[in-house]
Image (tube, grey):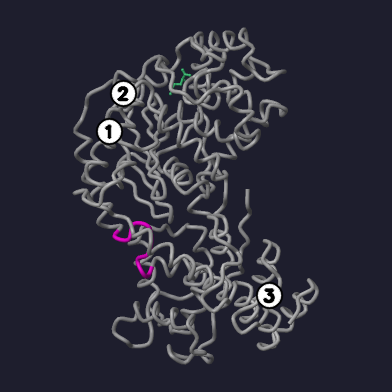
Amino acid sequence: MTEATQTPPPVKPSSTNDHGPGHGNGSEVDHREQQLFQSLDRDGVGSIRRSEILSVIKRMGLQLEDARLQETLIALHRYVEDEPITYADFSNIVRPNILLVERVLQGHTVIPDFEDFCGDIGQIYTETRKNQTGKVADYIPQLGRVAPDQYGVALCTIDGQRYSVGDTKVDFSIQSTTKPINYCLALEEHGEDLVHKHVGREPSGRGFNDLTLDSHGRPHNPMINAGAIMCCSLVRPKLDLADRFDFVMDSWAALAGGQRPRFNNSVYLSERGTADRNFALGYFMRENKAFPEGTNLVETLEFYFQCCSIEMNAEIMSVVAATLANGGVCPTTGKQIFSLRTVQNCLSLMYSCGMYDFSGEFAFSIGLPAKSGVAGALMIVVPNVMGICTWAPRLDKHGNSVRGVEFCKRLVNRFNFHNYDNLTGLSQKKDPRRSQLRAKSDEVMSFIWAVSKGDITALQQYLARGADINEADYDGRAPLHLAAAEGHERVVEFLLNQGAELNPRDRWNGTPLEDAYRGNHKSVISLLEKRGAVR
Ligand code: GLU
């Protein structure tokens, strides 16, 4: 897991060093900053108010607790409500989080018209709420007692835009939605080859707790009970049970951007007390020598019941789904939790096996990876766009949430989110996304811009998403050139530690050290020279 480096909050600037837009050094980067300021200073009076910045942030669906905006928000709150914020103040306030601020102010998030999109989601929520068919699971009293008509929908985009409607703060036990995450944890720990020696990746074509193994004597896949029990045996097997459980809880919290899940002990006790079938599956697999050597069967089953009894709400689970949608990088913290490969594998199996005996039909008609659980949760991933969690406890005959499935149907009827909607440009469906091509070219420019501004948090996110640390602009200027030219010692150090080339040459044959000398940035010069840089 990558740790985000925190940039200290900027000091509130004194008004004596004020200068208006256009009085900077005239570089491209300042021009971009000026444009942002001017977009807020609509009347052209040369100052803006705190509330104007905050209202754009909220309108775009970003939360004021968002870790990626903390430096800016702290700095902003040093100004009282109506105090004028000049261009110089603005620069200092936004600089530490400039990339995200820019994306938000320019409406360049993955869902640019977020208010409109949320209006549609709210409408789908209202329509699906009317559906009162289905029954709550009652194989244990703790689930049977849940008020059946509760319903919540929460979503989080890969840019961390959040929306929720209904009962999104009510806890539910995660049940089978634990399965994809435990599979990811097993993959991260042991790699694909070893994990799939013990569990297949084929839909079973049988019930989720059927007493059956594939032709190699393995459970069919990690999304059914036998496969999930197998994955549990692979998660930190050398630790004692308490530490294994802590590890799973910590992993969920990291996936959810730091929001901690809870644990429902009575659900756990009931699960354990009514687990004949799961015990039978365990012994059946042991008889077939399916487990890794040294597996303690009873402990593994206990661990599985505990994982099913973790509790969280739809808001938390939507961020977890968004982390999967974002290739393993949590959108609200920028931390890489799972590798891209792990997430690809997981989404592939959610796609083919995530919805019990309805999985084939769901893949066919909805075309999105999803995983449901018997407490009524549905975790839905729209890759590269967002994660969604619906929670409504009434289930259909397959064990999927009735409203959750209907929500998905309506979602893909309205938006072109089905996996194969991109086959034709002729789709009549709405596309709420920002153009991917445009987004890619902006990404390269923005990476370079983040360097010149010293926005390390954004840099980490770009690198986590696979940006090339040496990618140069059309003048052959690499990120290290810019960081050195601007005198950002911490960025220079960060780039070098991340493996940036030490002496890239721009089209005038200049190196970063040359830039540092030109700007007379002594600390950068000595840092570069210590590492062996040349002019
Ligand atoms: N705790 C349940 C079981 O193992 C999981 C139910 C589910 O969500 O599929 O039987």
Q: Nearer the viewer, residue 478 or 315?
A: 478
Q: Residue at x 37, y 87 (%)?
A: 46
Q: Amino acid at mark 2?
A: Leu
Q: Amino acid at mark 3?
A: Glu
Does the residue tagged 2 have its C-beta within 8 Å of any atom of ligand 1? no
Residue 108 covered by magenta stretch? yes
Q: Residue at x 62, y 20 (%)?
A: 300
* Magenta stretch in the rendered image: 105-113
Contact (Cβ within 8 Å) of mark 3 with mark 2: no
Q: Which residue is mark 1?
A: 365
Q: Is residue 512 above or below residue 469?
A: below
Q: Which residue is mark 2?
A: 395
How crowded pointer 1 is (Cα within 10 Å; few <14, some 14-19, many 20+) is rated as: some
Among the two numbered marks 2 and 1 on one chain, the one whose residue lies closer to the N terminus: 1
Mark pair 3, 2: CA separation: 57 Å
How crowded pointer 3 is (Cα within 10 Å; few <14, some 14-19, many 20+) is rated as: many
